[in-house]
Image (spheres, rainbow, N blue to C red):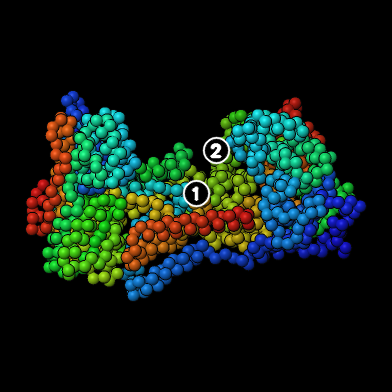
Amino acid sequence: MKRLLLGAAVFATCSSSAMAATIGVSVAYFDDNFLTSMRNAMQAEADENGHDIQFLDAQGDIGRQLSQTQSLAAQGVDAIIINPVDTAATGSMTDVAVENDIPLVYVNRQPEGSDLDNDHVVFVGSDQKLSGTLQMKALAEMLGGEGNVAIMLGELSSGATHQRTEGVKEVAAEYPDIQIVAEQPADYLRTEAMDLMNNWIVGGQEIDAIAANNDEMALGTLIAMKQSGISPDDILVGGIDATRDALDSMQRGELAVSVFQDPVGQGGGAVESAIGLINGEEVENIKMVPFQLVTPDNLEDFLAD
Amino acid sequence: MATMTAEDLTPDIADYLLEVVNARKTFPGVVALDNVQLKVRPGTVHALMGENGAGKSTLMKIIAGIYIPDQGEVRLHGETLTLNGPLDALEAGIAMIHQELNLMPFMTIAENIWIRREPLNTIGLVDHQRMNQMTEALFERLGIDMDPETEVRHLTVAGRQMIEIAKAVSFDSDVLIMDEPTSALTDREVEHLFRIINDLRAQGKGIIYITHKMDEVFEIADDISVFRDGQFISAAPAKELNSDKIIQLMVGREVTQMFPKEEVPIGDVVLSVKDLALENVFENVSFDVRAGEILGIAGLVGSGRTNVAETLFGVTPATSGSIAIDGQETEISSPHQAMLRGLALLTEDRKETGLFLGLSVLENMEIAVLRDGYTKSAFVEQRRLDHECDGMKELLAVKTPSLDERIGNLSGGNQQKVLIGRWLMTNPRILILDEPTRGIDVGAKAEIHKLISKLAAKGVAVIMISSELPEVLGMSDRIMVMHEGKVTGFLDRGDANQVSIMELASSPVEPPVAED
Amino acid sequence: MATNATETPDTGQHLEVIRKRKRKVPTEVSIFLVLVGIALLFEALGWIVRGDSFLMNPSRLLIMILQMSIIGIIAIGVTQIIITGGIDLSSGSVLALTAMVTASLAQQSDYVRAVYPALTDMPWIIPLIAGVLVGALCGLINGALISFAVIPPFIATLGMMVSARGVARAYTDGQPVSMLTDQFTWIGSGANPVIIFLAVAVIFHIALKYTRYGKYTYAIGANPQAARVSGINVRRHLVLVYTIGGLLAGLAGVVASARAGTGQAGMGLMYELDAIAAAVIGGTSLAGGVGRVTGTVIGALILGVMLSGFTFLGVDAYYQDIVKGAIIVAAVVVDQYRQRRRNKTA
């Protein structure tokens, strides 16, 4: 609650600044932890430079996101940042921005169409497939190149789920002694992952490693294992996102691998690009923020912040 | 032992308009109709009489094509009909006016009458002007004075009933079925209905008329068929029967005393009401009721009788005036408060405000005493309650396989007995009965009357509201008559008769005479 | 004629006897048979597809209940609300809110980012009580809106569903609340959620059947006007019913946060619909007046068996949702059929 008040106070001081540009942001989900970190990074970046920034929650609904884009355009913001709900359906939102001559930055999830061919439409984010690749490479090495791997999928409707999984599978295919033995969704949620892992455990299938599409599911998997008395050394668990909870878990010796997707790099970068576009500067059309593999070896670097 | 058959009906008229032969209909576990026949002559009103559950409604639904009989046939003008639905019957020339009204409230009168038969103009749109003219023509024929463009939701129940009748007439059917058409009508409206019926009769139509009201039957019917327990009992011209005979045929036994009013000593004033009013509904209502006394309240539908009862019981708390119990002025702002002060109210509309249809007999009976008795901490003392309810069931002779039976499966009379049982369990000192015998059969009626008398004899102060004048006259020590929200007079048992009550009930001229 | 009439036996009695003889099977028994049928189907498919038994595995049997425990606790609260003829759409969001509040009061002291650094390492009972109270408060607001502002339950709880989720997010700006004490997470560990679920089920089974509270609940659902005229304070009772519904959603939030070791604003998404589904599959009628806790428990188990069964067979989640939807619709069709039959005999 204190934070909320603080936020309001910051917002009040910002809006009094006359020189400020106004940036409207539509985020796919407010509930998502990674996107929340990214949102906070955007807020921080905007605050630092004295710009107004307004966040809208698309609640995973592409129709809602389009109307939000339209109302932001009608409101006359100086730039729009969109974290798309569906990477295949960004065309109409791009049209709205182009028609109204408003710079548009896509963040975190890259549009699949020709959106970025337009002037003043850019992308800031990371290659989701790469995160899967990094995760599986580390797990494969830890397994010594052999074993049974189960993939815990995020929401099936999300593009990141498919891209991350694709990365995992490509790496696994390079190792003849690594088998993908199961592949089922737990919707990026901790509790769902606990239930799925419980069912896998009683299923009796031999599993040596779990490649989860995000950290929350990896943490749920670890809780389920703990309650069944399975040591994290017997089944290696890998996540993606390097969230705070995940790093804590790794520190306790539970989580084997995570992949740091840089929310500050993406969020801050997106605001930076937006301001660049507003000021008519040259801005990179596709700005890739690199992923970083997190293992117990380099954990210290990430715990610092 | 020779049973009268339909053949006994004026055999010289060979051509029956409508015949039902050997109809049989079963529902899972119940034989609703067996070997039933009906012969309706053209240009007559044929009344169907019988207790609830006798099979009248089932027979009507077969004729109207709603039920398909397991056996037997329906003939119109001597030709056998194949009825697979209400539409078939309508097309063949049989129209039914349902007891429950089936009008669409947000459509106009005209739209309701001509629905699915709307006159169209050249480009295929509904020609409202012509539709309204057609309605006016129809109304003129029937002597109805209503604007065809009024939305049905603005009409009274009686008005809706008239529209249903007009709609049925508009099909120009040969046979019209009316299921208790007068149950919601005032006397004046009944008169109007009878004029319409006489008119239709003169045109050679056959009217099948279901009713419980004996006086109506003799006023309007030419022939009468009596049913009992799904069986055809007898048919005869109305002039050969009288009400005693009909009742005997209906119940299968002689009902010795219809109104077994006992003369009991009248005690002290228990309830005293002064200048009670509910804004815009009734005003200046003052009366006393004594222990052992039965005060009848008479008046037309809409006179405010039911509202007075509901106000006394705290359902709609009074806006002014005072209520005193045992001389102690008291406030009643909720039914629970009323119950604490010793009141009980058997409501007018059994289904709407009385029964929990989906629940068991037990659950219906015990509900009013849970709050102030039969509970230990939070738990209900079920065993004690079961015992009490069982005793009440015996006392009231409720016919039910067990207390766990769903109350919806009981007949109307037995449902009413359960509701009376609910209130007797609260040991009321003032019992208000609103239409205690509406829609229940003759046998159960007499039992309920006997019970009311017994309660009065025990010193309960009874207020009984009824639309049936014989009931009010037969049961009451005193009668209060209301008209349009005002008390128009009091009559003592000795002075009251149908005429004196109707005079007070239909004219506001008499100044209210509060006498004791 | 008269003699004939008097000699005819009173066949009215006879009709009632016929009716009595065809006593129906209680609803719960038929739902239980459905549960057994589904389980046996998976058993058969298990041998065919995987050459392994589905049911002969005690851990799996426990998991089937475990994964439905949290929804099951909500479903019991929802069942009594549906019996009154109402509905509660807010339970999933209330779960999220209570999980956030509860978790924020159950954090470890060595965690530097605690929401309330001064209130860490508290005994487990404090977050538990706080969560249950927050849930009850949400329910109280629902009940007051429905009873006193006379807003339809669908709308009132829809409002609460949206608002409670919003408060859950605002509580920590959407940040998860983690690092909970061991004694608190013990509440949600192992089979404890199952025990809590079954305890709640037993309590409410008794409450609905043997107490005034239960009898009034059914009466109001069967006919609110008749209930009022029978001296029941309908408004007050409805407020109580919704408050208890909220309280159970709050308890579910406590168990969920203890189980996952975290409080997150995105928890419990769509749980309200699963809870309603469990109640409806279990034979609770949306028309009110009808429903049993035992039915709801079996309804939740049906959902749990399906979840485990599909995972066991390795079937995609898509198909699982299709079948789940079909079962919910089938349950409502059966309910409608029962209602029609009821009305016919009435």
Corner quadrant of residue B129:
top right
Nearer to us in this view, C254 or B56: B56
To which residue does mark 2 refer? Answer: B333
Foreground of the two, B228 or B169 = B169
Q: Secondary structure at mark 2?
A: loop
Q: Is residue B186 left or right of residue A276?
A: right
Q: Residue at x 11, y 58 (%)?
A: A295
Element type where label 1 sits in the image: loop
Tell me which residue sits at (57%, 31%) in the image. B319
Q: Give the answer, above or below, for where C148 lies relative to C125.
A: above
Eye-nearest disc, 2 or 1 = 1
Can residue B425 be seen here? The reply is no
Subunit that carries the residue with mark 2: B
Residue kind at label 1, given as amino acid type: Gly
Where is residue A30? Give x, y as percent: 27, 44
Q: Residue at x 19, y 29 (%)?
A: A21
Residue at 61% across / 66% down in the picture? C22
Residue B41, horizontal then vertical, whole percent = 84, 49
Q: Which residue is mark 1?
A: C85
Give whichever of B502, A126 is nearer the camera.
Answer: A126
Quadrant where the C terminus of chain C lies? bottom right
Q: Position of residue C315 (x, y in %)?
A: 34, 63
Which mark identifies residue B196? none
